[in-house]
Image: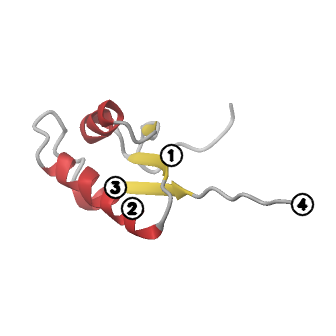
Amino acid sequence: MCVARSPQGHPVMVQAGGSEPGKELAAETAEMVYTVQSDFESGREFYADLKGRMAGCHAAPAQRLPDRFSSAMGTSCCTAA
């Protein structure tokens, strides 16, 4: 591929899902997490939980600070005809 090198110099590690094992994996390895939450408050709780897990994770490299963590919250939409 003829594309420029990413700003961080390596692929972005993204983890998808909100299971307990998934959150542990994200705390140890991910730079971004994609999850679907049912409302804004549960999204805030999920985000705070992951940041707390990252802060307490001794396996995480020093450059993976909780303030550099990103999350992408998805939403579900139901429509009826």
Label 2 crowd bin: few (<14), some (14–19), many (20+), radius 10 Å: few
Q: CA distance from mark 3 to mark 2?
A: 6 Å
Q: Mark 1 — residue?
A: 6
Residue labelled with disc 4: 81
Amino acid at pointer 2: Ser
Label 2 SS? helix
Give the Cα separation between the discs numbered 1 and 4: 44 Å
Marks 4/2: CA distance? 29 Å
The Cα–Cα distance between marks 3 and 1, rounded to whole angstroms, is 28 Å
The local secondary structure at tag 4 comes to: loop
Mark closer to the chain start, 1 or 4: 1
On the image, the x and y values in percent for residue 21 come to: 31, 30
Q: Residues within 10 Å of mark 4 (few under 14, many from 20)?
A: few
Outermost residue, front side? 81
The residue where tag 3 is placed is 46
Question: What percent of the width, then of the height, locates residue 4?
Answer: 59, 44
**In the rendered view, would you say 59 is above or below 31?**
above
The reply to whether dot 3 and dot 2 touch (C-beta < 8 Å) is yes
Amino acid type at circle 4 is Ala
Q: Nearer the viewer, residue 79 or 73?
A: 79
Mark 3 or 4, nearer chain start: 3
Question: Looking at the picture, does residue 45 appear above or below residue 4?
Answer: below
Q: How is the image coloured?
A: secondary structure
**Which of disc 2 and disc 1 is earlier in sequence?**
1
Tell me the mark number nearer the camera, choosing from 3 and 1. 3
Q: Amino acid at mark 3?
A: Phe
In the picture of the structure, the residue carrying the numbered disc 2 is 42
